[in-house]
Image (spheres, helix red, strand yellow):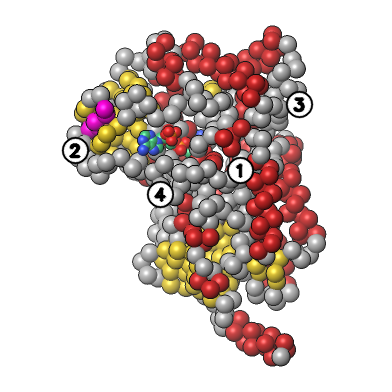
Amino acid sequence: MVASQTIAHKAQTETPVDFDAVIIGAGVSGLYQLYRLRELGLKVRVFEAGTGIGGTWYWNRYPGARFDSESWTYGYSFSQELLDEWDWEEHFAGQPETERYLNYVADKFDLRRDIQFKSRVAAAQYRENTRSWDLTLEDGWHCTARFLVTAVGVLSAATLPNIVGVKSFEGPSFHTHYWPKEPVSFVGKRVAVIGTGATGIQTITEVAKTVGHLTVFQRTPQWAAPLHNARITQEEMTHIRANYADIFARCQDTFGCFIHTADPRSALEVGVQEREAFWEKLYGEPGFGIWMGNFRDILVDRQANRLISDFIARKTRERVRDPVVAEKLIPKTYGFGTRRVPLESGYFEVYNQPNVELVDLSETPIERITPTGIKTSACEYEFDMIIYATGFDAITGAFDRIDIRGVDNVSLKDKWKDGPQTFLGIMVDDFPNMLMVMGPHAGLGNFPRAAEYSADWVTGLIRFARDRNLTRIEATAAGCAAWTDHVIETSEGLLFTEVDSWMTGINRNVEGKQVRRIMRYSGGHPKFRERCEAVVADGYQELALA
Ligand code: NAP
């Protein structure tokens, strides 16, 4: 009986599939995943909704877009040749430079020929009889693949605000994620920006440089700190290149794969003067040191968090001339670092400009968008342009937008309605042969560092299956439950879990995303890798393989 079942299955799995693997997304993780799977000799197709490669760096071309990771820690590490050839121009590269870099990578490794652009995946259905996935694109195009690899990003499902009349404005309006490729001028214009997250802060700072009049609509202020970007000199680049091995090794050792390591001291055990001097130093240095390289307890201990919050508040007060405006810009409902800290380049000084106004929506909420502007509870504003920097349905949003169905037609969206359940953030029970690169429950941080690891792990598993003629890979329900519990456990005691933000799964513009959930692994990347390696060392016995 068992033998004949095996034979029957063999025959069914011999039904030809169009592709060995389909990858959704040609961003940082999708590109690298393609490179790796091609190395295995697999027939791979990438579906990409955009007309070019880059994912985040293709879409987010809003004014001022740049990353907060040091460029030289952000590039791929897998190819020495690539490291030798590519010169970063800025310590924190802007969107055009990063998009150029990813295009360079795609060309160098001849990746484009397997990428199908303007191809948004609408549905993916697992077929048990063939142990493969049926993929349907928005335009109805259809194909089959043994493995479905999602590389859909963490912040790729942009959301407009759920404000009445949002479609009624008659002038130009843009969500920052869908910024046009053509230049947009703000000169002489009355511009509104809604949203003050990392995106809003960058946009506002850049728009303010040339705008006629800018009005910022702020619902929640952000704890932001200076980026201190600079160009990279030739000597610096030579030094960076000589030290790449150390740089990447150091990133591997840190919690979030950034170059910054937490200081082992408690903020409470050092004297006031020493603490202040340390914070002054961090505030004056480039990058995430103030967040990731700070005392070990600022994100877990309320008193330590209060002290660093007070320090940043003082800095903000020093930078904003009008004390009333300064107070509005200082968060009062959550502490520093418990939301993702935006790094800024002159953001607070923007509010010293006579042509910039801050509207605090906690005092005067928006009632509606009108054909000519925005109406708050206090007054009606007229604008020539509205910019929505209102963020994303983060982490699970891009999955929710695809109708993904596994065994017995179970829907992934339904399965995750109360929060994601995964094994290692890579697999989900009931969804055989689906592998997620940087899926929910993966650790967040310096994205390419973590994505390279994730794609390598996925590649290792597919190689293992191929070498043994295995055609069905699934996480067990017990494995998913245990990993999900562990992910929740690692978040306990961290202050960020008590705060509404995209990192805790909140998006007040999306139905069903109003309750905090644990969306990411918080045990740090070294521990994450250790757990993943243990699964490999054990011959993947924790998975159901057939
Ligand atoms: P975000 O942090 O979620 O910010 C969205 C902003 O829009 C918030 O200020 C939010 O207010 C506001 N908003 C949303 N709906 C609204 C409504 N209906 N009415 C009024 N205000 C509304 O999104 P984001 O700024 O796009 O950033 C998301 C993440 O992308 C960042 O945290 C970061 O990880 C990444 N990012 C990175 C960089 C970088 O590397 N430099 C740059 C940009 C983005 P509430 O806070 O009250 O919800």
Magenta residues, as a range?
A: 373-377
Q: x, y percentage for residue 47?
A: 47, 61
- Residue 376 in the image: above or below residue 128: above
> Alpha carbon of mark 4 to alpha carbon of mark 3: how far?
41 Å
**Which residue is pictured at 65% across the width and 21% down the height?**
303
Q: Which residue is mark 4?
A: 511
Which one is earlier in the sequence, the residue at label 4 or at label 3? 3
| Neighbour tally class for label 4: few under 14, some 14-19, many 20 plus, Cα within 10 Å | few
Q: Is residue 452 left or right of residue 412?
A: right
How crowded is the residue under tag 1: few (<14 C-alpha within 10 Å), some, or many (20+)? many
Along the horizontal axis of the image, is 254 left or right of 37?
right
Q: Which residue position is annotated with label 2?
A: 371
Give the residue number, with chain letter if any, for mark 1: 444
Q: Can you tell which mark lies on residue 131?
A: none
Q: Residues within 10 Å of mark 3 (few under 14, many from 20)?
A: few
Closer to the camera: disc 4 or disc 3? 4
Residue drawn at x 57%, y 81% is: 129
What kind of residue is marked 4? Answer: Glu
Q: Magenta part mainly helix, strand or loop?
A: strand
Q: Amino acid at mark 1?
A: Leu
Kindly report which numbered mark, 2 or 4, lies closer to the viewer in this rendering.
4
Distance of label 1 from label 3 (alpha carbons): 21 Å
Front residue of this view, candidates 68 and 93: 68
Q: What's under tag 2, amino acid-wise?
A: Pro
- The residue lying toward the viewer, choosing from 523 and 346, is 523
Q: Pinpoint residue 534: horizontal percent, then vertical percent.
A: 78, 55
Label 4 CB-ligand 1 distance < 8 A = no
Image point 56% across, 65% down: which residue?
Answer: 148
Sequence-wise first label, 1 or 3: 3
Question: Is tag 4's residue or tag 1's residue first in the polypeptide sequence?
Answer: 1
**Label whose residue precedes the other's in the sequence (1 or 2):** 2
Is the Cβ of the residue at disc 2 closer than 8 Å to that at disc 3? no
